[in-house]
């Protein structure tokens, strides 16, 4: 989250009139993240998050907002989009598509313990099962096609070792995709960005999952790989912390046990997840957008994770 498009108090008050939520009490920009413009909003009738979508196609918003509605209706703790008086989940504000969602309790836990990893693993499995009957379809917007495009754009900024790593890993993922083109791994609509800063804890209680705007249809194992690659590692070298990994994966498997083909694909899914975020961070670093508030992230971290996954394949037994 970030602020690229400013919103004044008067503009927010006028926009909120369509919701019947009472008087605007406070408006504050959110600095974390790098994709959309986000604001905390308090009104007489509750606490909310206002998002102005900077790059997300307006035609894709029904998928993302509908997914949150669907999951919230299945008792998944996530933001619930607020419909206006005419039943619309989004409109336009300052020339950008905009939506209002409920604000969840808690803060991000950037140094999780195994117990918190277990809470996330169990919730992720429940999200996967709840999404099975979500009818809308949207391919993962940061899937293989985007990797190819981003690789072309960032390659001039890499040294020889990095370029070789990128080309070798991209070739391996393309080969896997060709081999599984007619028999994809089990999946559904998935979060695809379940990093530590997208989960809130209210004390010891899991407050919920936020930021579904990179969601898309992909395999459940890819989504699990994205999650463990952030929650279960030593940030210094990208290596797994065994107790954290065992807690998260164990809790996931207690709810949903992966099939045999998913277990075989697991090492490559870990690499795919690392590649996806290495490319994203390289792209954001070398092809940045202007913003009033922005918090860029270091691509070297994801490069270390990718090198670790390639060096030490991790089986899921």
Image (cartoon, rainbow, N blue to C red):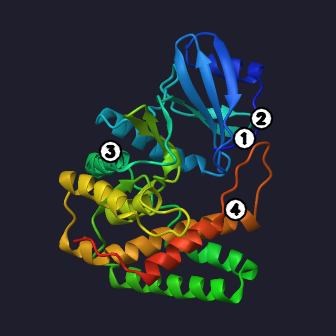
How far is mark 4 from mark 3, CA to CA? 31 Å
User: Disc 2 and disc 3: Cα gap in Å?
Assistant: 36 Å
Q: Dividing the picture into quarters, in which one does residue 3 lie? A: top right
Helix, strand or loop for disc 3: helix
Q: Nearer the viewer, mark 4 or mark 2?
A: 4
Choose between 306 and 21: the one closer to the eye: 306
Residue 276 visible? The answer is yes
Q: Nearer the viewer, residue 295 or 167?
A: 295
**Whole-percent x and y of residue 112?**
44, 48
Mark 2 in CB contact with mark 1 (< 8 angstroms)? yes
Q: Point out the image quarter for the C terminus.
A: bottom left
The first of marks 2 and 3 along the sequence is 2
Residue 3 is labelled as 1
Q: Which residue is mark 4?
A: 284
Identify which residue, 256 or 149, lies in the foreground.
Answer: 256
Mark earlier in primary sequence (1, 4): 1
Residue where numbered disc 3 is placed: 119
Residue shown at 47% from the left, 28% from the top:
105
Q: Secondary structure at mark 4?
A: helix
| Residue at point 56%, 73% (across, down) | 304
Above or below: residue 42 compared with residue 99: above
Residue ID for mark 2: 6
Numbered disc 1: secondary structure: loop
């Amino acid at each position: 989250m970030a602020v690229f498009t400013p919103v004044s108090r008067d503009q927010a008050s006028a926009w909120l009139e369509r919701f019947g939520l009472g008087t605007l009490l406070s408006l504050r920009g959110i600095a974390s993240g790098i994709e959309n413009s986000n604001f905390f909003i308090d009104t007489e009738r509750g606490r909310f998050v206002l998002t102005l979508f900077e790059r997300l196609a307006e035609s894709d918003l029904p998928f993302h907002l509908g997914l949150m509605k669907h999951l919230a209706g299945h008792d998944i703790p996530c933001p619930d989009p607020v419909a206006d008086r005419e039943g619309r989940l989004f409109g336009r504000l300052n020339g950008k598509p905009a939506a209002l969602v409920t604000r969840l309790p808690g803060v991000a836990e950037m140094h999780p313990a195994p117990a918190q990893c277990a809470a996330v693993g169990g919730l992720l499995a429940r999200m996967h099962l709840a999404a099975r009957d979500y009818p809308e379809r949207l391919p993962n917007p940061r899937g293989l096609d985007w990797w190819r495009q981003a690789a072309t754009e960032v390659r001039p900024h890499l040294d020889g070792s990095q370029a070789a790593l990128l080309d070798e890993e991209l070739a391996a993922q393309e080969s896997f995709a060709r081999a599984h083109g007619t028999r994809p791994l089990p999946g559904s609509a998935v979060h695809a960005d379940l990093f530590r800063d997208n989960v809130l804890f209210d004390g010891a209680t899991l407050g919920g999952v936020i930021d579904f705007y990179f969601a898309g249809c992909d395999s459940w194992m890819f989504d699990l790989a994205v999650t463990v690659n952030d929650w279960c590692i030593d940030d210094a070298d990208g290596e797994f912390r065994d107790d954290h990994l065992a807690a998260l994966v164990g809790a996931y498997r207690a709810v949903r046990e992966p099939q045999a083909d998913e277990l075989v694909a697991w090492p490559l899914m870990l690499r795919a997840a690392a590649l996806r975020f290495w490319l994203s961070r390289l792209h954001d670093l070398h092809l940045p957008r202007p913003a009033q508030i922005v918090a860029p992230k270091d691509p070297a971290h994801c490069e270390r994770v990718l090198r670790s996954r390639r060096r030490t394949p991790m089986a899921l037994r």
